[in-house]
Amino acid sequence: MLELAILGLLKELPLHGYELKKRLNGSLGHLFGVSYGSLYPALARLEKAGAIEAVDPPVATATIPATGSISGEAAAARLRRPLRRSGRTRKAYRIASRGQTLLTELLSAEAPPGADEDRAFALKLAFFRHLEPDARLHLLRRRRASLTDQLARGREALAAIAAGRSPQPDRYTRSLLEHETRRAERDLEWVDSLIADELQGGTS
């Protein structure tokens, strides 16, 4: 999922590793926190695969207003030369054509076995704007099917407990089951509203 988050952010504009980490932990921190120890290896993998490419960062220049004197203009010209940064220049990245394709593939792919489906869907939703409407609708309907199944299983388990067909759980386990079932109901209503917006042609 880290590769998806990186490509989604670089789709919008080129970024340095530091800026990527800041955006990942800032705008997507509730979904995806990241350390430099995982970010830079992921960037290296994507660059090696041709999904992203390095770009030269713009060189800062100093702008000095005209003084009206020859000596003043000469000094200003010297100060308008590119400023040299000391130390190592940070490497900036932008998405490549292969990365555009990979981003679409990652957004459309099903969550791998054992993955947190809720978190995976939320991360994909953050970059839904990069998908075509039909692809967005397909993913929303797939999520709806998953939630419908989850809700049915929760209701069935609660009904079985109430009817005495299943062992009576302790109050904490029952409370958790009720909570998960209510959350599935709310999430299903939310996804239904997103589907309705897509069918009406909403893009915001």
Image (cartoon, rainbow, N blue to C red):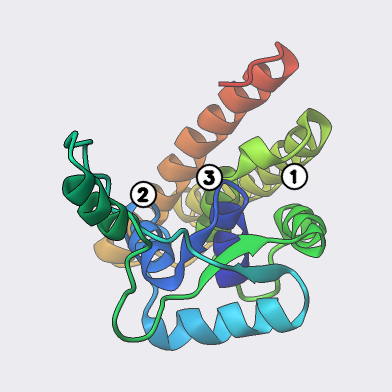
* Placement of the C terminus among the 4 image quadrants: top right
Residue named by callout 1: 142
In terms of secondary structure, where does tag 1 sit? helix
Label 3 environment density (alpha carbons within 10 Å; few <14, some 14–19, many ≥20): some
In terms of secondary structure, where does tag 3 sit? loop
Q: Which image quadrant for residue 203? A: top right
Q: Amino acid at mark 1?
A: Arg
Q: Are marks 1 and 2 in contact (CB under 8 Å)?
A: no
Q: Amino acid at mark 2?
A: His
Q: Is residue 4 visible?
A: yes
Q: Are marks 3 and 1 in contact (CB under 8 Å)?
A: no
Q: Are marks 2 and 3 in contact (CB under 8 Å)?
A: no
Q: Residue at x 82, y 63 (%)?
A: 98
In the picture, the disc for residue 63 is none
Mark positioned earlier in the residue sequence (1 or 2): 1
Residue 112 relative to residue 73: left or right: right
Residue 141, position in %: x, y? 74, 37
Q: Amino acid at mark 3?
A: Ala
Q: Residue at x 58, y 32 (%)?
A: 191
* Placement of the N terminus among the 4 image quadrants: bottom right
Q: Nearer the viewer, mark 1 or mark 2?
A: 1
Residue 155 relative to residue 69: left or right: right
In terms of secondary structure, where does tag 2 sit? helix
Residue named by callout 2: 179
Mark positioned earlier in the residue sequence (2 or 3): 3
Query: Which of these two is toward me, 143 or 152?
Result: 143
Query: Which of these two is toward me, 186 or 69?
Result: 69
Residue named by callout 3: 126
Q: Which image quadrant for residue 193? A: top right
Query: Which of these two is toward me, 172 or 80?
Result: 80
Q: CA distance from mark 1 to mark 2?
A: 23 Å
Q: Is residue 51 above or below residue 148?
A: below
